[in-house]
Amino acid sequence: MSLINSGIDNVRIFELPCGIWADGAYIGSPRTALVMWRSAWEGKYYQVYVNGKYAGATVDDQQRQMIVQIPTSFESPVRIEVFAVEPEHSVIDLSSEVKSSPGQSGRVRIDMLRGQCLPIGATARIYFDKGTGEIDYNEMINGSPIRIWPSCQDKAGFGMSTFGAGDFGYDSAAAVGFGRGCFAHGQFGLDADTMKWTSPALYAGNYKFAVKVVDKAGNESNSSETGQVTVIPAPRPAEQISISSFDKQTNELVFAIS
């Protein structure tokens, strides 16, 4: 593992002002934040990840702060993490090594491999167990079927036609593995790219999902089921913190959070 999460502490995130009034009050700058930290490392560079995605890296081993772009959301908090890396790894996106919190947004993402064996006009239908442990195949969770090939060109040849009748990965414009999908995960290592689907917001609980593929004639494939997925929705972030009271005798400060 290239990312080092030990030896880094006192991580602080500050809102940046984009305007200051005469009385000292300010207007926060949207979608940006200043991240500062302390580190016990010498000779290391640092990378910052926002919600598990690479947000930037330091330019030398002395830098201990960085301005990053952040999403704005009233439904879930933003997770910002700082890691130490070797200098030669500083500009490499290592987000695949970042462990995401399960069900942080209260949603589940399903990745599906799309291969050339799937016909034009086929659709994917996604079902789930509604937390009961038994998948309900009478009602799709995705509302309407997902088109496997949104356009004919996706399953065409290199000349945007049906070039090549074989199934070696060279008979598609998607080039299945040539930059549009999941390289080396399909048959012969080239003939599959990735479809992604994200569920609606779910309540906390354990869920199972299943996918069926249906062709234009209505023929259904066997279902492909997932294992049990634990969903833990993130708490709604506090919008305002104010001082409710302070007891001098006990030195106790009480905050009001709304």
Image (cartoon, grey):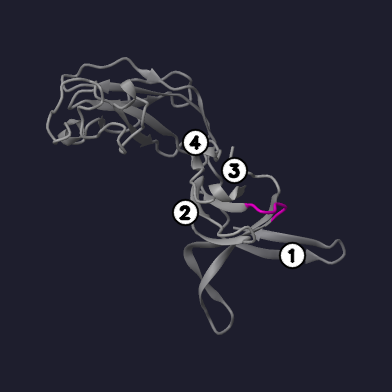
Relative side of 41 to 68, left or right: right
Q: Are marks 2 and 3 in contact (CB under 8 Å)?
A: no
Mark 4 or 1: in front is 4
Separation of residues labelled 4 and 1 (CA atoms): 35 Å
SS class, disc 1: strand
| Residue depicted at 53% across the width and 50% down the height | 49
Q: Is residue 152 above or below residue 235?
A: above
Q: Are marks 3 and 4 in contact (CB under 8 Å)?
A: no
**Residue assigned mark 3:** 3
Q: CA distance from mark 2 to mark 4?
A: 18 Å
On the question of residue 140 being in view, the answer is no
Q: Give the mark nearer the N terminus: 2 vs 4.
A: 2
Q: Amino acid at mark 4?
A: Tyr
What residue do we see at 60% from left, 47% from top? 86
Label 3 and label 4: CA atoms lie apart by 32 Å
Give the magenta part as a residue range: 39-44
Secondary structure, mark 4, is: loop
At 36% from the left edge and 35% from the top edge, which residue is drawn? 197
* Residue under pointer 4: 203
The amino acid sitting under disc 2 is Ser
SS type, badge 2: loop
**What residue is disc 2 on?**
73
Which residue appears at 32% of the width and 38% of the height? 179
Corner quadrant of residue 220: top left
Q: Magenta stretch containing residue 164, yes or no?
A: no
The crowd level at tag 3 (other Cα within 10 Å; few <14, some 14-19, many 20+) is some
